Image: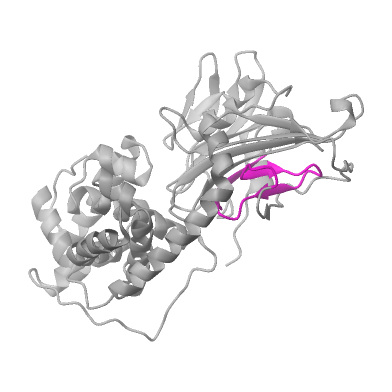
Amino acid sequence: MDDLDLATRLDRSIGSAPHGGAPLPTLIAEGRRVVRRRRLRAAALSLAAVVALGGSATAFVDRSAPTPAPTGRPDERSLELRPPANDMPLTYTPAGDLRLDPAYEVVMRVDNPYFLPSPDRSVALVVQNQDGERFWGAAFWYAPQEGRNEGHPLSGSSFGPAAAEGETFQTYVDQSLPVGTTTSPARTRLVRFEGDGFTPLLGVTVLEGRSDVDLGTRFATGEDDVAAAEVRSPGGDVYYVLGRQGPVLEPWVYVVTKAEGGADLDAFLDYARDRWGGDRAE
Amino acid sequence: MRSEDRDAAFSEFVAARRTHLRRVAYAICGDWHQADDLVQTSLVKLYAAWPRVRRDGGEEAYVRTIIVRAHIDETRRPWRRERSGDVPETPARAGASAEERDALFDALQALPMMQRKVVLLRHWLGLSVAETATELRISQGTVKSHTSRGVAALQAVLGTPAEPRC
């Protein structure tokens, strides 16, 4: 079965298309509506686009708004879709609520990529617009705290087109590290994951690894690649890493300390299943 | 670009390429209704992006990329539509025996989604490893491994060993 043969057989197996498809005037009318909507939106987003092209994180302190202290554990799954208040498509409000411009649809979400201690919050998102164009964003929110920011909340966000030259979502998020964060960047850069295993970065040792990890469909579908490993950092600390990537999802490595993840890799997988896993409701 | 010029050029493209694009969508999703939805969505997006895409000369690749990615998105939506009782006209299939055609198409649809797409892009549409990787947003190594597994599964149906084009 040479390539030409397979191509021919595939072509025949697919067959010819039956009559169908929307009439051309319908396509053009719908296309014109999309163009009109986009032009209306362009004015609202023009300033945001300038910021996004810069690609750098911005931070601001809102001193005019009320600064309620959060109570209890923050609900990091909440995401309010409404027009942004400060010309950034992705932002935290002074009260710590996450907002995304409804012109975008969330493709992938990583909660607390900067390992901020509660009640501080951070999030990283892969979103796409109506044309299927992807954008990356990251945001953080520091709760009002005595002795920090004069008791005011501090938040910031970064937003820009996805996949700039040589950049991955993970490196984009790393480079948008919040101002003043105490997180060690090394913790976010232990390994790279590209679907077929972990590549340890300089000085990192993979102690034990598992591929084809199944945490349930809430975490990944059968099309996604998932692996886990126990690794030792250059400084000697031991972490568990959980890598995931797929046709829709950008490669991402979750990092958990050994103290948090459990005594061994099996214990960590139980931990990961409880934290991120389970099956989606049909 | 004037509206009339955009409409004329877009209409010309749709007239020339819609049938092929519908077959691409059908080969990926195995359902003519869903294929038509995918193509319609993609063509509307193409119309909106027409000046830029036309300038770059990538109209067909633009639509095809939306089709393959949109289908992925559709399958991940919990509210994915299922239709029943509205059977499309059976397409005419010429060439090889009906048994072989059905078996091959069934085998193609039985492949995991990404394997199916890789096999179609590489071995039906003739894209290179690099082009396939870019279109599907996966690594070239993943393209090669999916190609190998996908072609092997199709060979089992056709009963003819061959080296996959990796």
Asked whether A107 or A216 is in front, the reply is A107
Residue A260 vertical position relative to residue A89 in the rendered view, above or below: above
Occupied quadrant, residue B75 = bottom left
Does the magenta-highlighted stretch encompass residue A97? Answer: yes
Region rendered in magenta? A85-111
**Residue situated furthest left in the rendering:** B95
Q: Provide residue A148's location: percent of width, then percent of height.
A: 86, 25
Residue B81 appears anywhere in the view: yes
Q: Where residue A62 appears, x then y in whole percent?
A: 80, 36
**Residue A138: x percent and y percent?**
62, 37
Q: Is residue B143 left or right of residue A174?
A: left
- A186 displayed left or right of A7: right
| Quarter that holds the C terminus of chain A | bottom right
The coloring applied to the image is one colour
The residue positioned 23% from the left and 50% from the top of the image is B151
Q: Residue at x 52, y 44 (%)?
A: A213
Image quarter of residue A81? bottom right
Left or right relative to A256: residue A149: right
- Nearer-the-camera pick, A213 or B68: B68
Q: Please tell me which residue is depicted at 37% across the width and 63% down the height of the picture.
A: B44
At horizontal 31% and vertical 45% (from top left) the residue drawn is: B146
Q: Name the residue nearer the viewer: A67 or A174.
A: A67
Measured along the vertical axis of the image, is residue A249 above or below residue A236? Answer: below
